[in-house]
Image: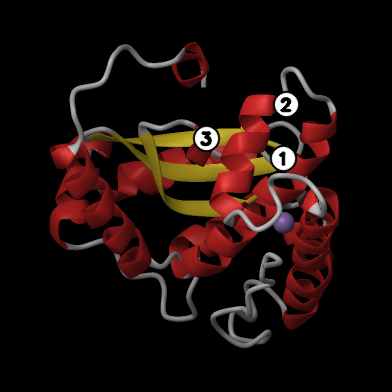
Amino acid sequence: MALEFPDLPYGYEALEPLVSGTTLKTHHGRHHRAYVDNANALVLGTDLAGKTLEEIVKRSAQRAATDPAMIAVFNNAAQAWNHAFYWRSLTPRGGREPQGALGRRIAADFGGYAGFAQAFKTAATKLFGSGWAWLVADGEVLRILTTANADTPIVQERLAPLLVVDVWEHAYYLDRQADRAAYVSGVVNHLLDWEFAAENYRRAASASRTAPATGPAPAAAAAA
Ligand code: MN3
């Protein structure tokens, strides 16, 4: 079965004025769709055809070191996964601070929500070139992480993404031109979906409680 191109979870104009309908139509309808179409075309006739998107991302990441053809599979499949997660990380009803267990964890790890927001904005704004800014659960601890290009934390077994913000220029250039900081501030202050993050955090926390003890972190994770 081919990979599905998911609908946006809200209308194209739902995030205005912070993210315009024009941006969302292009970003979702052209960029995200192209990643899904390319991934489908690239796995056709290979043993990755029919696998889930997450499996294709993980297997192509593992094989890319020895099989250069897997680099394009990874780039397109990972971008398809990252974009689907990004749409769900945003909501027109955002702007409320995280509550409950996730809110307490953020207070513990970042010295309060304001500390988190400032650190996240700085990381997202300063990331050089194209990429993504993530809030991830790393075992019991929360971390802010940036990845370049299509890279995604789901290839690291111990990391569970909670939220992501796309900082490729196509995410903001039509609205903000070169002012990435304004886009990032608007998203963090008004559009992050903390209920989605809390759901991801609950799932990650219960998985880490039931998981067997693991060995040392892989080198890639330690360097990230
Ligand atoms: Mn994008």
Q: Secondary structure at mark 2?
A: loop
Q: Which mark is residue 17?
A: none
Q: Residue at x 15, y 49 (%)?
A: 104
Q: Residue at x 79, y 24 (%)?
A: 67
Would residue 172 be visible to someone looking at this image? no
Q: Which residue lies under the disc numbered 2?
A: 64
Q: Is residue 190 left or right of residue 125?
A: left
Q: Work out whether 128 lies above or below 188.
A: above
Across and down, in percent, residue 23 comes to: 77, 72
In primary-sequence order, the first of circles 1 and 2 is 2
Q: Residue at x 82, y 51 (%)?
A: 45
Tell me the amino acid under the disc marked 1: Phe
Tell me the distance, in whole angstroms, between the alpha carbons under discs 3 and 1: 11 Å
Q: Which mark is residue 74?
A: 1
Tell me the distance, in whole angstroms, between the alpha carbons under discs 1 and 2: 8 Å
Q: Which residue lies under the disc numbered 3?
A: 155
Across and down, in percent, residue 73 comes to: 77, 42
Q: Secondary structure at mark 1?
A: helix
Ligand 1: quadrant of the figure: bottom right
Q: Work out whether 220 lies above or below 101.
A: above
Tell me the crowding category of disc 2: few under 14, some 14 to 19, or many 20 or more residues within 10 angstroms, Cα based: some
Q: Is residue 18 left or right of residue 26?
A: left
